[in-house]
């Protein structure tokens, strides 16, 4: 396993971190995590050098932390750096910080969190937790040992990111970065800015919620196949992120043992500045190909759920994007009535805007739902 320095701290973390957001489940129920499979994957990952585990209060409908606690309690806890996140949207006052941290400590069956993040900060949430006393809380929690390192995860514009970095003596931050999102949200400029301020930078969504590797278009496959070295799309995408020397950890939401094994193999040799100029140009061609085809840059995080009208927004966007990427719009329209039976009806949207307020990507969700409705409408 490759290890990288955690910002200015005197610790080294595995280049690959295990993200506990997309775990294997039973019966398609995101709250019913397959604990046995998770334990097998986590044990394998730790045995092969992974020492960074990342979860959050809301993952898997508030069940991820519980499962992580169960999996780590029998000998693994002391072998890993454990990261989890404060549910910032539930914070209304200073006491709430302590309330939720104590709940998380119990769920995780531990007396301390190594890396504790303020979750999914945007301008509004940042101002809210700042006014609620987040600085005092973090200072106190570090002093009494409940947390070791303080950080934040981020979903907003670069202009919001930099002032947050400067507002407190943060140990680290977590941002979204992949070869399609080089200039999205904090982006590469935010990565370098945080690094210049001494923060470790943890990367989430390196595969864009799996969308860069699940069903690769033929045009993109042809570009990959033209490379001198043959690699899988996941291998290439992760290498692009690890190529940045400012990156400390790349989180991968691994849901299968095969994904754990492949990602570990990639992490062993994906060193900073290791991509050739020809390989970097290959990514530019791939980015342009995807941009021409993708309709909605949704990462399937499900923050927009539940919809009051029962519309399962992420699944509709996934199907819409797949149809666009693979040229199967007619099949999408033909199967639309069947999809509605399971996913609700986009036409039922009352434009309440709850989804857009919760979306970390700031997507115009209501407009995209209208696009889908218009797409499948009977032609005159």
Image: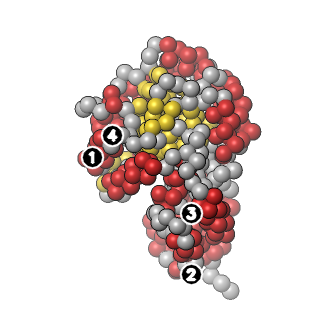
Say which of 311 and 113 sits in front. 113
Residue 231 in percent (x, y) is at 46, 63
Tag in front: 1 or 4: 4
Q: Which residue is mark 3?
A: 317
Q: Secondary structure at mark 1?
A: helix
Q: Determine if residue 42 is in view.
A: no
Q: Which quarter of the image is occupied by the N terminus? A: top left
* Left or right: 77, with 242 as reference point: left
* Viewer-side label of 4, 3: 4
The label number, if any, that marks residue 271 in the structure image: none
Image vertical order of residue 337 relative to residue 98, above or below:
below
Tell me which corner region of the image, top left, top right, bottom left or bottom right, holds residue 325.
Answer: bottom right
Q: Position of residue 322 (x, y in %)?
A: 54, 69
> Crowding at label 4, few (<14), some or many (≥20) Cα neighbours within 10 Å?
some
- Pointer 1 or 4: first along the chain: 1
Q: Which mark is residue 330?
A: 2
Task: Name the front one of labels 1 and 2.
Answer: 1
What is the secondary structure assignment of the residue under circle 3?
helix
Residue identifier under label 1: 40
Inter-mark Cα distance, 1 to 3: 32 Å
Residue furthest to the bottom in view is 380
Q: Position of residue 117 (x, y in %)?
A: 53, 31
């Amino acid at each position: 396993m490759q290890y990288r320095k955690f910002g200015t701290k005197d610790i080294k973390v595995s280049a690959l971190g295990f993200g506990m957001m997309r775990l294997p489940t039973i019966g398609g129920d995101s709250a019913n995590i397959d604990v046995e499979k998770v334990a097998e994957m986590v044990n394998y990952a730790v045995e092969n050098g992974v020492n960074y585990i990342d979860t959050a209060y809301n993952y898997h409908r508030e069940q991820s932390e519980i499962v992580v606690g169960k999996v780590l309690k029998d000998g693994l806890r002391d072998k890993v750096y454990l990261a989890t996140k404060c549910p910032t949207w539930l914070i209304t006052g200073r006491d709430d910080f302590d309330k939720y941290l104590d709940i998380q400590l119990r769920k995780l069956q531990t007396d301390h969190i190594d890396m504790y993040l303020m979750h999914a900060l945007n301008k509004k949430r940042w101002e809210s937790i700042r006014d609620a006393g987040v600085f005092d809380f973090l200072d106190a929690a570090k002093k009494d040992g409940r947390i070791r390192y303080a950080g934040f995860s981020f979903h907003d514009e670069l202009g919001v990111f930099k002032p947050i970095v400067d507002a407190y003596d943060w140990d680290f931050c977590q941002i979204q970065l992949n070869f399609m999102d080089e200039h999205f949200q904090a982006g590469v400029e935010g990565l370098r800015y945080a690094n210049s301020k001494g923060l470790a930078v943890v990367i989430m969504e390196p595969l864009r919620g799996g969308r860069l590797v699940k069903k690769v278009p033929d045009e993109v496959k042809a570009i990959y196949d033209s490379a001198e070295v043959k690699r899988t799309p996941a291998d290439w995408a992760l290498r692009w992120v690890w190529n940045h020397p400012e990156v400390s950890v790349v989180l991968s939401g691994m849901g299968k043992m095969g994904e754990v094994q492949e990602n570990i193999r990639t992490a062993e040799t994906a060193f900073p500045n290791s991509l050739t100029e020809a390989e970097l140009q290959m990514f530019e061609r791939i980015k342009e190909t995807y941009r021409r085809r993708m309709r909605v840059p949704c990462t399937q995080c499900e923050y927009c759920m539940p919809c009051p009208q029962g519309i399962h927004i992420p699944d509709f966007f996934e199907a819409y994007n797949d149809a666009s990427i693979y040229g199967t719009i007619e099949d999408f329209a033909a199967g639309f009535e069947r999809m509605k039976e399971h996913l609700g009806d986009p036409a039922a949207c009352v434009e309440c805007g709850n989804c857009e307020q919760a979306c970390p990507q700031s997507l115009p969700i209501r407009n995209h739902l209208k696009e889908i409705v218009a797409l499948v409408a009977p032609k005159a």
